[in-house]
């Protein structure tokens, strides 16, 4: 951790005569890399003295930065740059030409429905203001699905994708500074979203069956909300079973005021049964997205929840986006009830499972511990992420660095199944385990 102020040249990164100017100056310094994650900002009184301003002005600037997730307040350690400042300048490295990309987390296009076929079948018309924002067929299908999995479908809403549903639920209940329990390793976009809302992610360890009950219990008293992935956890592939779900419900019942969000982003295509931890919380939401099973561009998620949560979500949505396109809702409904699509989803779940099992087995032969009970990803534990990625890249494969997915957990890499075949598992595992530097090569197909 660097302390800004011990390096005189770093002081020029923070300027301004008003709170907004100071906030913008720090933001620019973070974006350009002059301030790095976990750098400590000067104490309020010291920066106020350096800028010839009142401490109240500097404090207001720091509050704004914290609200937007750019910095965190760490008690006696002062104010630090967030470990994951939510700025658009951060990007994933491009994959070199000829290298097979196993880093994106995209589903295999071979298991996605053909959009033109369903667009031709779609019965649509012009909808007008004041009409219901929902397509009844979609809600009926979703309600039946929720009910079959012991999730109450009494109150439903439609969001523009899984993260949109999660964001709207968090905003409906929490204020900046509230702590949100997250899985660690976990989904990096969720971490970034939480920070961007001015909330604080609290990492909770996971194993192959999801959140570890003892870890949740240790953190629960400081949490205002918890986000749980019941299956196809990203990046580890963890999935709840009946026993773990019951254990987590028992822990959560100790604090029913904690907001519970279930992110069921993969659904039936995950290859795992549905197990919910809802039942004891006063406020809750289960968000089911269609993007992995039907296609990433179909930004539709159905949210089930308690009356207050859904009412607030819908009320705020009306003030902004208004509703999710009924054309998209109708298209998702048409696909979801089609027997051919249902068979395609079942085939995808089976194929992804075979790919995961083949890779985990091949990695085990190389004495590399890996995880992936469900979904699209395998999480391989490695001592050095950069070295592991370099080995794969030299052999013609690209994977995702685990750093983006970790808060406190140990190093690893994420290997996605969408672009690999089960027969390639041995080659990938051998490349990852190789100590020698193989000759550079490219791969196609």
Image (cartoon, grey):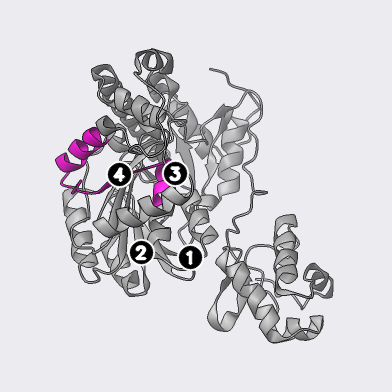
For the residues labelled 2 and 1, the Cα–Cα distance comes to: 10 Å
**Residue pointed to by mark 1:** 199
Secondary structure under tag 4 reads: loop
Is residue 164 rendered to the left or right of residue 384? left
For the residues labelled 4 and 2, the Cα–Cα distance comes to: 19 Å
Residue 358 x, y percent position in the rendering? 35, 30
Which label's residue is closer to the chain start, 4 or 1?
1
Give the quarter of the image for residue 434. top right
Foreground tag (4 vs 2)? 2
Which label's residue is closer to the chain start, 3 or 1?
1
Location of the N terminus by quadrant is bottom right
**Residue pointed to by mark 3:** 322
Number of dots carrying numbers: 4
Which label's residue is closer to the chain start, 4 or 2?
2
Q: Residue at x 42, y 23 (%)?
A: 421
Secondary structure under tag 1 reads: loop
In the image, residue 166 sits, relative to residue 128, either above or below, namely below
Q: Is residue 371 visible?
A: yes
Residue 239 x, y percent position in the rendering? 28, 46
Q: Is residue 43 visible?
A: no
> Which span of residues is magenta-colored?
139-166
């Amino acid at each position: 951790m660097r302390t800004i102020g011990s390096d005189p040249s770093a002081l020029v990164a923070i300027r301004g005569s008003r709170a907004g100017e100071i906030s913008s100056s720090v933001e620019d310094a973070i974006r350009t890399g002059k301030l790095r994650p976990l750098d400590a900002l000067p104490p309020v009184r010291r920066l106020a003295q350096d800028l010839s301003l009142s401490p109240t002005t500097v404090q207001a600037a720091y509050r704004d930065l914290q609200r937007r997730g750019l910095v965190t307040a760490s008690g006696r350690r002062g104010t630090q740059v967030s470990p994951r400042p939510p700025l658009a300048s951060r990007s994933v490295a491009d994959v070199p030409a000829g290298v097979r990309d196993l880093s994106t987390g995209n589903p295999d296009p071979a298991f996605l429905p053909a959009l033109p076929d369903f667009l031709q079948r779609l019965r649509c018309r012009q909808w007008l203001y004041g009409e219901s924002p929902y397509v009844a067929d979609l809600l009926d299908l979703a309600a039946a699905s929720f009910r079959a999995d012991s999730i109450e479908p009494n109150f439903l809403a439609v969001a523009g994708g899984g993260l949109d549903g999660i964001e709207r639920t968090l905003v409906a209940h929490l204020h900046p500074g509230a702590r949100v329990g997250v899985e660690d390793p976990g989904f990096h976009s969720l971490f970034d979203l939480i920070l961007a809302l001015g909330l604080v992610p609290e990492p909770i360890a996971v194993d192959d069956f999801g959140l570890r009950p003892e870890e949740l219990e240790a953190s629960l008293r400081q949490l205002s909300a918890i986000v749980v992935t019941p299956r196809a956890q990203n990046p580890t592939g963890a999935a709840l079973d009946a026993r773990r779900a019951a254990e987590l419900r028992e822990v959560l019942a100790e604090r029913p005021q904690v907001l519970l969000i279930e992110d069921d982003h993969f659904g039936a295509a995950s290859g795992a049964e549905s197990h919910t931890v809802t039942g004891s919380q006063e406020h809750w939401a289960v968000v089911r997205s269609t993007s992995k099973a039907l296609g990433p561009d179909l930004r539709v998620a159905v949210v089930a929840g308690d009356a207050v949560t859904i009412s607030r979500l819908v009320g705020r949505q009306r003030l902004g986006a208004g509703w999710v396109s009924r054309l998209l809702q109708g298209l998702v409904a048409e696909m979801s009830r089609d027997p051919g699509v249902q068979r395609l989803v079942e085939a995808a779940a089976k194929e992804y499972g075979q790919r995961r099992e083949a890779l985990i087995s091949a990695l085990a032969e190389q004495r590399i511990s890996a995880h992936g009970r469900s979904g699209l990803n395998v999480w391989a534990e490695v001592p050095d992420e950069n070295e592991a990625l370099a080995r794969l890249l030299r052999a013609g494969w690209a994977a995702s660095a685990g750093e983006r997915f970790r808060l406190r957990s140990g190093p690893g890499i994420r290997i996605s199944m969408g672009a690999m075949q089960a027969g390639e598992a041995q080659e990938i595992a051998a490349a990852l385990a190789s100590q020698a530097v193989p000759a550079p090569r490219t791969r196609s197909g």
